[in-house]
Amino acid sequence: MMGDSKEAGAEASPPGAAARGGHSVLSQAESEEPAQGSALFLGGNEVKSRAVVKYSSAPPRTAFARLEEKTDLKLPPANWLRESAKLGPAGTTILGNSKRSKPFSSFGMAYDFIDSVGNDVDVVSDSENIKKLLKIPYSKSHVSMAVHRIGRTLLLDELDIQELFMRSSQTGDWTWLKEFYQRLIDQKWQRKKKSKEHWYQKAILSKFLYYSINGDGAAQPVPSPAEQQESSSSDQTHDSEGASWPAPFEMPSSVSEDPSASSQGLKNDFVRNILWTFEDIHMLVGSNMPIFGGGRYPAVSLRLRDNNKPINVLTGIDYWLDNLICNVPELVMCFHVNGIVQKYEMIKTEEIPNLENSNFSTKVIKDIAQNILSFLKSNCTKEGHTYWLFKASGSDIVKLYDLTTLCEETEDKYQNPFTMPVAILLYKVACNMMMKKNQNKKHYGTIRTLLLNCVKLLDKSRHPQIIASANYMLSELFQLDEPKKEENSDSPLNENSDESYSEEEEEMPDSDENGSYSTSSDPADDNKAVAIIKSVGELSVPEKYKSIHQIRPSCAFPVCHDTEERCRLVLSYVLEGLKSVDSSIKKESDLPAADPNTPIPLKYEDESTKGGPEGLEKQMALFLDKMGSLQKGNCSGQSGMTPGSWQHKMKLQLILKSSKAYYILSDAAMSLQKYGRALRYIKLALQSHDTYCCLCTNMLSEVLLFLSQYLTLCGDIQLMLAQNANNRAAHLEEFNYQTKEDQEILHSLHRESSCQGFAWATDLSTDLESQLSVSCKCYEAANEILQFSDLKSQNPEHYVQVLKRMGNIRNEIGVFYMNQAAALQGERVVSKSVSAAEQQLWKKSFSCFEKGIHNFESIDDATNAALLLCNTGRLMRVCAQAHCGAEDEFKREFSPEEGLYYSKAVDYYLKALRSLGTRDMHPVVWDSVNWELSTTYFTMATLQQDYAPLSRKAQEQIEKEVSEAMMKSLKHCDVDSATARQPLCQYRAATIHHRLASMYHSCLRNQVGDEHLRKQHRVLADLHYSKAAKLFQLLKDAPCELLRVQLERVAFAEFQMTSQNSNVGKLKTLSGALDIMVRTERAFQLIRKELVEECDQPKNDEAVPAADSSPNLNREEVIKLLSIFESRLSFLLLQSIKLLSSSKKKMSSNTEEDIVLQTNKQIYSQLLRATANRNSTLLERIDVIICLLEQLASGSNGSSGSAVP
């Protein structure tokens, strides 16, 4: 509960404390009223009461002077009506002079304790009003109070109808209320004058209190500034009284046009402000009751009673409540007869309800309090409305009217004098809640409602500053950049949205829900009264109204389901704020201020005093000049706002907010891939920012950072537009569309600036090169801004992002120029040399890659630097290819230029690998660079091998270089890692081994002489052939390559056989060659499988030729290889038969050799028959070969170990 949290003592001084009393707020130790709560047990019924003094301007308590018996109170004491600090305003207000017509006393307290309003406190009021309400069931006197709702707090003020109508007859105002009052309530209304007896009793009480002041203190009064204003003069036109009612009552003509000036009269005039917790009701109460002490009594209240008149219930309740509110434990009663003092009597506070003739139940008082609060909270639902609680004298019926609604029927809402104080209070409470940075977002709904109701009450033409400020604060409530999840975090609030009260909702159903309130005998009353209590007796029934209406929750904050909705709301408030500022500039000379004594607290005040670093404005001016902004140095803008004026400051903040909102909208559109829309929004963001720069006199680093972010996003959008050129029409349509709201905001911006500073960045070009160029320029500009002051070091993450994007766009542009060069190269006639245009494109591309690499290296982004080095390597290969195409195909040799560029490419790839360091850093990039490097080495070796530069180098040197390049390619070709690229690597490695084996085979055939070298080549050829065969066997889609390698191996064996002399050696070689032939079975099985699939396919469509149905299999090559295979197998079998037959004649019989010979003869015979049949299909021929190979394999297995001696 509120009271518990304040138990430690009085709080810090409220804003108005010094102004009204000059006394500091008392600490717990010196407070004249104890701050601890007290639970009183009265008449067997427990009532919880607790009072915490929030502010006191009274001096330390002194004992009261006990008057001698027979003292005549009709005689004035010497110090009568002098200012007395001990009595405070009580001495004079008792006479009724200054107290009358203070209809805004609760507002004065609310302004001073703004923290409590709208949130923790249920009621703010004068203690007299509280007492009057709680006595309703016991009293026949009339009750007339104004009720206002601020959040969950109700403000209660006396509404003196007599005073009101007396003034109304003089000024002609409020006639509508007077007519309404006479028609419905009191048809024969006339001003009731107070009796002489009333004034006599007032005077005696005043004299008694002055007599009771201790003599020493009376001579030396200590007046405070506030008390001086409360002079004892009975002059009815006293200043304090005149200022208490705003226009249209008694305001001077110079101020009467400005109702807001009246707020300076809303002072907190109470001696003490107390936070009183009565049961579960928290009240902020103002009290002027004099409290005395001294002797054995820590605190007593002093009362004067006529001995001939017994204390009645109303007086008893009065005394009891006063003591409870001020936490006074005892009452001192002085009895008199005709003004002559008779005796004193001490009564404890808890005994007051049991006094003779004034018995009352404290529990009933508690029930009355709870019922009245529930009744008011249930029915006073609209913030900003003035409700009137009225009970006619002698009546049992209590009625509640909505004066605002009644007033609106008169077509002038400003006739209601409460309008301005209520609007100002709504604004101040909202401001106060906004200032609490660490508060929970659950208050945002309340703040929004406060501000919307404030704006609704004010006239736009009279109060542009408050309206602009309120709209700015409304826009601040929506966190533009918050993640979407957070929007629904306060779900309990959102669940109550049906019960929330805000300006859009009609609250009329409340009266329907409470049928017990709204029935009345007079049908005319039903039409006007919001609610009715049929009988005051109902208020004594426990929880009579409580069960019908619980206290309403805080109003819900609107749930924005997406970013665009949230930004659109923000922009709608920004637009209202801008309109308010713009409209005020035209007629600044007669602009009213909300409260001349109270500066409106706005966020921008802090920012404007921070100040930017020296030279920042100069740097920014140079930058804007370079970017093409035309308004550099024109701080006042084109509309003529004075720098430093509220319009200037407010417009700056609103423009900045709009730029942020458009930026977020652009970012959201970007994520939805709506690039045209994104460009339109970022254009508006940059136009807003450009206007801000034109107006701003003191550039903040935070604002420069925003500009850097906007340009970065603009660069992103231009890049995406470049990459999505196929959808250009749709993007253009989105870009050109504009809402009315955007147009109006732009119109307000154009009042200050041409908004052309960044027009170059937001053009929607159709040319790919210019789009990439603009994107790059945006990033460069964003980076340049970060170089100002120490922005770079303050925002390292953003700096890294900008440099990454710069590196990326330079890579994109580099690739663009490289592809253009490659396209030119493709169009060029083969024999022509490299054109100047190609070379120019190479240079541009190389320059972009180089800058991009520098960008990435400066932020230690090794991965991206490696990718750009890899692309530079690719550019070098494009250059090399351009030079290779410039020569005649027949005279073609591997040129030095090609060699140079391929070497450069290798260098860049090696740099890329060094940049990465290890594969673990980024396996995908590492593998990619490795593959490219392997490809470069392989291409170099292949070209040197196929187009050997024999005119420049010796054969041996070329062979050595080819061998080295192939081995390097092999080194960077990872055949073992199970990646998506593994089959490619295996094919590449197999091809390298095949080419090396072929080269060594060729060397062996062509070389004469050096036997050692020949032997070396023989071993190497054999090694590479076997490795190539193994790798090709791992692949399912390279049967022809496998077959070719095996056939070359057989040819190699045949070549070796020619140099052998012994039959044994030849037989061994033949046996090995036949083994190779057997191992080609897998290749034929794969070819057969593909042919079968081909045959199955064209069944549906016979018109499709079989050869075209499988692009993987080259039929012609298969037929060619099959023919060679058949001839070589036939040759090997024939040679085997010859050698085995001759060895059989020479040697004794060998059973195993006989079997092999027999098998080979059979296979040879079948092969001859098969090849002789010209009508066999390819599939049939392959089937024959597979069958023969299987026989050959079983035959050789049977003779293993003995076929070759």
Image: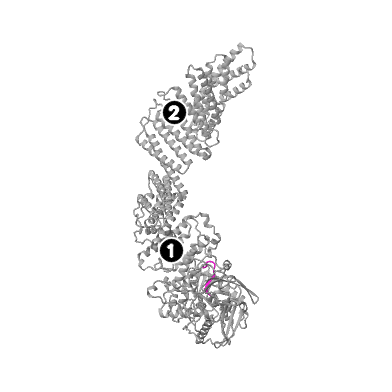
Residue 832 percent across, percent down from the top left: 35, 31
Residue 730 seen from this side: no
Q: Nearer the viewer, residue 784 or 1103?
A: 784
Residue 1066 percent across, percent down from the top left: 56, 16
Mark 2 nearby-residue class (10 Å; few <14, some 14–19, many ≥20)? some
Secondary structure type for disc 1: helix
Give the side of residue 705 with respect to residue 303, left or right. Answer: left
Above or below, 700 relative to 177:
above
Residues at badges 1 and 2 in contact (C-beta under 8 Å)? Answer: no
Of circles 1 and 2, the one toward us is 1
The answer to if 123 sits in the magenta stretch is yes
Residue bearing the label numbered 2: 943
Instruction: Give me the C-alpha separation between circle 1 and circle 2.
Output: 76 Å
Above or below, 644 relative to 957:
below
Q: Quadrant of the N terminus?
A: bottom right
Picture residue at 47% right of the left edge, 39% below the top: 866
Q: Nearer the viewer, residue 363 or 19?
A: 19
**The disc labelled 1 sits on which kind of residue?**
Ser
Q: Nearer the viewer, residue 85 or 267?
A: 85
Above or below, 56 relative to 870:
below
Which residue range is magenta in the image? 116-126
Residue bearing the label numbered 1: 469
